[in-house]
Image: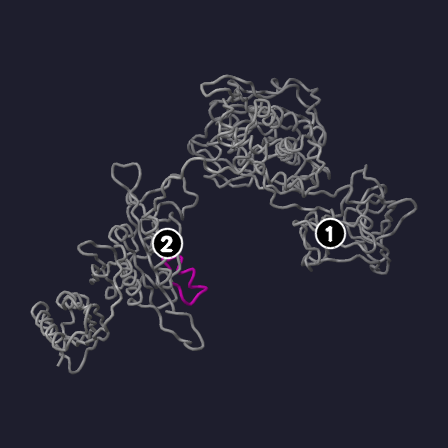
Amino acid sequence: MRVPLSWLREFVDVTLSPEDLADRLTTVGLEVAAIDYVGVQPPEHSPWSPDLSSAEPPEYIPWDAEKIVVGEVIEVAQHPNAERLTIPRIRYGDGQEISVVTGAPNIKVGMQGVKVVLALRGARLIDGHSETRRWITLKPTKLRGVPSEGMVCSELELGLSGEHEGIIILPDDAPVGAALVSYLGDVVLDIETTPNYAHTLSILGVAREVSALTGAPLHPPAVDVEATGPAVSDRISVTVEDQAICPRFVAGLIEGVQVGPSPLWLRHRLRLAGVRPVNNIADVTNYVMLEWGEPSHAFDADKVHERTLIIRQAQAGETLETLDHVKRTLRPIDTVVADPQGPSSLAGVMGGADSEISDSTTNVLYEAALWNPIAIRRTASHFKLQSEASRRFEKGVDPELPPLTARRGLQLIKQIAGGTVASGLIDVYPQPIEPLVLELPVSEVRRILGIELSHAEITALLGRLQFSSQPIDSARGPALAVTVPTFRRDVEIEADLLEEIARMYGYDRLPETLMADELPPQRGNEHYEAVNTIRDLLAASGLDEAISYSLTNPATAAAITLSDEQMPADMWVELENPLTPERAVMRRDILPELVQTLISDLREHERVALFELGAVFHPAAGQLLPEEPQRLAVVLAGRREQSTWLNPEPGNFDFFDLKGVIEELLRRLNLADQARFTRAADERFHPGRCAKLSLGEREIGVLGELHPVVRNRLDIPVARVCAAELDLGALLELMQRTQYREIARVPATVQDLALVADESLAADEIARAIQAHGGSYLEDVRLFDVYTGTPIPSGQRSLAFRLRFRAPDRTLSDKELAQTREKLLRALERELGVQIRG
């Protein structure tokens, strides 16, 4: 919410500096994200001061009070050497006049008495003729042979907007010779409004907060519209079919208006507040919304059939062309304002093109209403039409505002567009909303906030925010019955009142209180710690953690399969109202989205190594909620390590790099002895480079290299992509605590064993057999060489293992090792048909 201070001061006296006011508002929850100095010279040490030394001017620039002033056109002559140029003579003080040359199309020969913005020699402005935004410092010059001593300025040159077609024409009451900064300069607070402070989405709402903080009286503008036309009930009619979707609807009428540009003061304020001016009628609706916080809408009354409005649910198949000229097919759950021929606007979200205000409009039907917040949010989200109006209706507006808003809108339209206002308003409000009354025990203030406050003090603090209180007795002791003002739709429970008391008392004044009770015993979260252990181990292995969307679409999941066929709809947990079709279902696997992340990262990096931990979602038959098993996914692609001068061409990741990462993780989780890798078939992976991981008899997951067809379909620019997806829940369940043992005091004995085995026999199975029959002194078994070819027979291969033996109390003798070796070889030949290589 952008708040111009000149506008705010019309509601409340502001004596603080903009910087102090920003600090005070921030301390009570209205965070001021920025301060914009429009024409005003910012304080020297303000943290919000723009960089005026930069070659590119900031969004808003200061206006030199001596060199940028209000001028009055005395006469305008034609340039003797250029048809499109004129020479206005400008008065800017007693006896002070200069001539300038301009090509502005709104300066005409013979013009007199018009007020303009005059920049004198030395003024620093934005160059309106440059294709890039840059500074210019004004100096006398000649244009086509005629001296020009200054410049009449457009909005672009002053940093007010991008408008450069004509110069600014000031109102007749602009004081000649006055500094422009004193006339149009302003300071704007940019407030980041949180959802629970929707009551501050207006100048009036912010003014209430300033009044409560400073004690300055609040004085909103008087709403006094002169209504001399016929009774509005004789000119228009309104029917509300369902009060649940529209608790209150107010309509008024003004006839004989003249549509055109808004006056400068209105356009200037809207621009400062971040709203683009359109025409005087549309600008009034935006102005009133910003001023009071209640969105309203103006219809061309002559385009409303029979001048009858019907508030109802849309009918299936109905269409409406909205103001953005998009034809939309409505749903029965969408609320519309219709006439007897069909929808005229999407209630609370956007008006319809058929009843839009145009230059030919003369009669305006003005509407202000109270809408169901859930219905507005549902419609705005479905049509992707989040607007300033829907934003306010979604959060809830004051039910007392619609008649005030309608009268204020009619008042301003009559003021700037003329016309005759019909007498009275149509106000459909069958069940008035009563103010909420909450019980607040005085003891809760001390219990929750840690401060002692009396009835009177609590009443005074809440009274600053326009809450009224009455002392009562309650089951919890002395209490207050607090009546919540209707504009505070966020205050619903006792805790909300305590928050308001704390805000007004001052968060910075709340005492620091230590807990009086003994701290409960601290218990670790074993699941959280175990997940973090796995996260740390993978990061230590050179991988980066990724966090991808839990929402996906079936096409993304199918893209990493060989068939590219999507799963049936009943296999997915579908979102009822997805934000985008690309995020319409909950993921069944982590890998598809992680592969998409890998593809994106490969555009920027030659090495990508990622992992992700998270839940996946599987529909559960007969249950409302899905099952959410935990998964671990890993992807590797590109270089094994970054290229360096020492190793400019490092090798690329392959299956064994991925297997090594998984093995190291299992080793550190004390699961290596249970792990078994076996050949697997999975359509996502290369048929010869895919393995299934089991721990004991329990299948944990699959790993391998993506199938070349899949890799080509996804246009991945590397030769191999390694991926794995494991059952994280099973890993957490099976992982063993680290066991510590005494450091060996005797040396180990290492022996190499070269074996010949069938190519179909997995090396892992041989290693397991060695571990099983290698005796109690066998510490470690590692495969260090694989060989095929002469003199190894066809269909067989040689595998060399390194065995490490160690006794805890002595060095093993050659005799002991030889006996163990013979026993081991006999067991290998007997069980696996493996023989020692000759």
Q: Quadrant of the N terminus?
A: top right
Q: Residues within 10 Å of mark 1 (few under 14, many from 20)?
A: many
The answer to whether 675 appears left or right of 581 in the picture is left
Residue that badge 2 annotates: 593
Quarter of image, res 635: bottom left
Residue that badge 1 annotates: 157
Q: Quadrant of the C terminus?
A: bottom left
Q: In the image shown, does 164 or 454 lie closer to the viewer?
A: 454
Does residue 198 show up?
yes
Amino acid, disc 2:
Glu
Q: In the image shown, does 274 or 130 lie closer to the viewer?
A: 274
Q: Earlier in the sequence, mark 2 or mark 1?
A: 1
The answer to whether 518 appears left or right of 275 in the picture is left
Amino acid, disc 1:
Glu
Color style of the picture: one colour
Region of the chain picked out in magenta, as a range:
594-612
Residue 359 falls inside the magenta stretch: no
Residue 607 falls inside the magenta stretch: yes
What x and y, as percent, mark residue 558? 32, 53
